[in-house]
Image (cartoon, grey):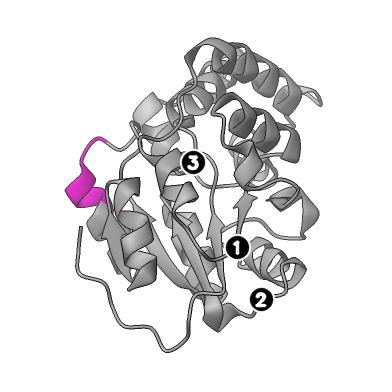
Amino acid sequence: MSAATSRQEPVDLVIFDCDGVLIDSEVISTRSTVEALATVGYEVSEADGFRRFVGRSWRSIRKEIEADLGKPLPVSFEEDVERQTLAQLATSLQAIDGIGDALSRLDPPCCVASSSSVEWIRLGLQKADILHHFEPHLFSASMVENGKPAPDIFLYAAMEMGATPPGVLVVEDSLPGVQAGVAAGMTVIGFTGGSHIIDKSVHGQMLRAAGAALIIDEMTALPDVIAG
């Protein structure tokens, strides 16, 4: 863990991304996406899938892929991917190590702001047995005009929670997520503990370069970081 930087404001709200931060689901969801894309003639490796898709909304991913293909994806493509992902999630999903303990030790209010659907967020958190820490404060990119790396979802979540950007701390594992938090004027903690992150040092450097104030690779460190 890197040393914390000083904050000008107290932490009034902690916004968590979901996949790769609360639940260790990025490997599952990216693999399902890559496999589904292959069925429509769009070949991409799992490694490229992590690089290109993690942290982004389906709306932006679909737009990019359709531009590459020169034709629209099937109307039901996202639903098909989510159905396949949910089937794997039911047997394979794990909570991020230490997240339950970390959440129980946090003082500021918390919420989730994710590129995933609310249904996916709720199911994932329920299976990880941490839903009670957040519900009903679950926010999806489908609720705003632009997904990450635009700041819309974080600004919307903060507004709904009655907080202003200087007092908000965001926990993110992806480059688009860090960029979104920085663009929202919030302090961002980069998290590198998900199983989809192979080289934690390199990934942490990338998140730092995007504006993350500090990097942690274990959720057990989060409460002390927030307490200062």
Task: Locate residue 193, reporting x and y percent.
Answer: 31, 41
* Residue found 65% across the figure and 21% down from its top: 81
Q: Return the residue at label 1.
A: 109
Element type at mark 3: loop
Q: Is residue 187 magenta?
A: no
Report the quarter where the N terminus lies. Answer: bottom left
Report the quarter where the C terminus lies. Answer: bottom left
- Looking at marks 1 and 3 on the same chain, the residue that comes earlier in the sequence is marked by 3
Task: Locate residue 210, reporting x and y percent.
Answer: 36, 66
**In 3D space, how far apart are the residues under numbered discs 2 and 3 (Cα atoms)?**
21 Å
* Residue found 48% across the figure and 49% down from its top: 103
Disc count in the image?
Answer: 3
Task: Locate residue 86, reporting x and y percent.
Answer: 63, 18
Task: Locate residue 13, reporting x and y percent.
Answer: 57, 68
Q: Amino acid at mark 2?
A: Ala
Foreground residue, 128 or 36?
Answer: 128
Q: Return the residue at label 3.
A: 22
- Looking at marks 2 and 3 on the same chain, the residue that comes earlier in the sequence is marked by 3
Q: Amino acid at mark 3?
A: Leu
**In 3D space, how far apart are the residues under numbered discs 2 and 1 (Cα atoms)?**
10 Å
* Residue found 56% across the figure and 60% down from its top: 15
Q: Is residue 201 magenta?
A: yes
Q: Nearer the viewer, mark 2 or mark 1?
A: 1
Residue 167 visible at all: yes
What span is colored magenta in the figure? Answer: 198-203
Element type at mark 2: loop
Q: Amino acid at mark 1?
A: Pro
Task: Report whether 167 appears left or right of 21.
Answer: right
Q: Are marks 2 and 1 in contact (CB under 8 Å)?
A: yes
Q: How many residues crowd around disc 1 within 10 Å: few (fewer than 14), some, or many (20 or more)?
A: some
